[in-house]
Amino acid sequence: MSLPMAMATAFLSVMSASCSSVSDGNCTNLLQTRAKSQVMLDFDGVTGGAQGCTSCCNNGTALTPCFDAVECAASGPAAGKYAFVFTYTGEPPNNFLPHIERAARQSHGSSTFDLILLMTKEDAKTLNSAQKQRMKDYNVQLKEVDWAVPPNMKYQGPGHGAGWCGSQDFVRLHALGFEGYDAVAYYDTDIEFQGDVTPVLRCAAQGRFLTTNGGTGEPLNVGFFAMKPSSALLQAALAFARDSDYNELTGWGKSYWAPAGGYFIGGECGQGFFHHLFYKQDQEASKSALAEAGFAPGSLVVHQLDRCTWNYQTSYDCPDFDCSRVRAHHKPGHPLTDPHECLKLGQKWEPRPHA
């Protein structure tokens, strides 16, 4: 397998985008690189049905047709117990849980939907009175945890974690172990529900692990995932963290980067970790961690969904997409240069005046 040493050869354009915690000063206007490598293009043959994207879903090795969450949901529980999970690390921003109202409106029959904010015990101390009142207004439950990065994690980030996105990504691992729910869906706080997202929960409740790819061509975006939680899933993640080292050439646990041609945005953090663990089950690092947690080979079923509908992240690979089909809108946070790009509710694209 040929692995490029630098991403520059695979990228054709650069855009500004905010990362998972909207208005977070540490990550607002983070430059993200939009991958358009040959590996991620020219797969028109795998599209099917009403799929909006042309090259967005993969199985850890190659691109595949996206999984139909709505069709899957039809076989889900008639009345399920579900949870939407959100996280903050460090001191929460002033623009706190900006889209929580639309999350609170989600419903399906007699199913129940809890709203959970997950924070470390230390970070939870920084919640102010206005933020606590907002949580109370929307019945958001605070779940305090002991760690953001697994205590025995082998890889601790570059320069012992300096500038690393590990904490904000790995604290969400706790959601994997939220037993007692039929399914749990994690969403970054800058994701706005613009339609019914409950099918992902009803589908995940059948034992399916669901994600999408990312808006810069990365094989997985860790801003959304849904699964049937279990202590075994969390145990597998902790075992993988304990045993699997990381480097930019070989990825996590020497599992490499397919179907990408090499390192992708967030590869050293949650996006690479989740993709290597859950979608590369034929690799020794994943196989060992899952076996330790009691998973028989092939028993953990993973799929990817159409990003244009379930985790919209700019118009990249969603050309001329019908915005009424967007159910969860992630990015952009404000209008950019594409007049056809789907926006947050209430926003309107206008041409920018020439300088």
Image (spheres, helix red, strand yellow):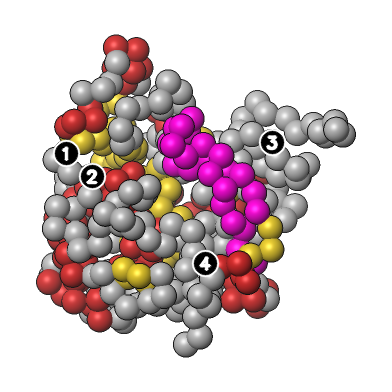
Q: Nearer the viewer, mark 4 or mark 3?
A: 3
- Residue type for callout 4: Cys
Judging depth in this view, the residue of 285 and 137 nearest the camera is 285
Q: Secondary structure at mark 4?
A: loop
Name the mark on residue 335: 3
Give the Cα distance between marks 1 and 4: 32 Å
Magenta residues, as a range?
14-36
Give the Cα distance between marks 3 and 2: 33 Å
Q: Nearer the viewer, mark 4 or mark 2?
A: 2
| Relative side of 299 to 62, left or right | left
| Relative side of 106 to 146, left or right | right
Name the mark on residue 57: 4
**Is disc 2 in contact with disc 1, using a CB cutoff of under 8 Å?**
yes
For marks 4 and 2 on the same chain, the one whose residue lies earlier in the sequence:
4
Judging depth in this view, the residue of 50 and 123 nearest the camera is 123
Q: Is residue 334 above or below residue 303?
A: above
Give the Cα distance between marks 4 and 3: 26 Å
- Residue type for callout 3: Pro
Q: What is the x, y in percent for residue 70?
A: 48, 54
Q: What is the x, y in percent for residue 12?
A: 69, 63
Q: Residue furthest front?
A: 159
Give the Cα distance between marks 2 and 1: 8 Å
Name the mark on residue 145: 1
Q: What is the x, y in percent for residue 351?
A: 83, 34
- Residue type for callout 1: Val
For the question of whether residue 43 can be seen, the reply is no
Question: Is 6 colored magenta in this rendering?
Answer: no
Dot 4, how many residues are within 10 Å of its Cα: few (below 14), some (14-19), or many (20+)?
many
- Residue type for callout 2: Ala
For the question of whether residue 34 can be seen, the reply is yes
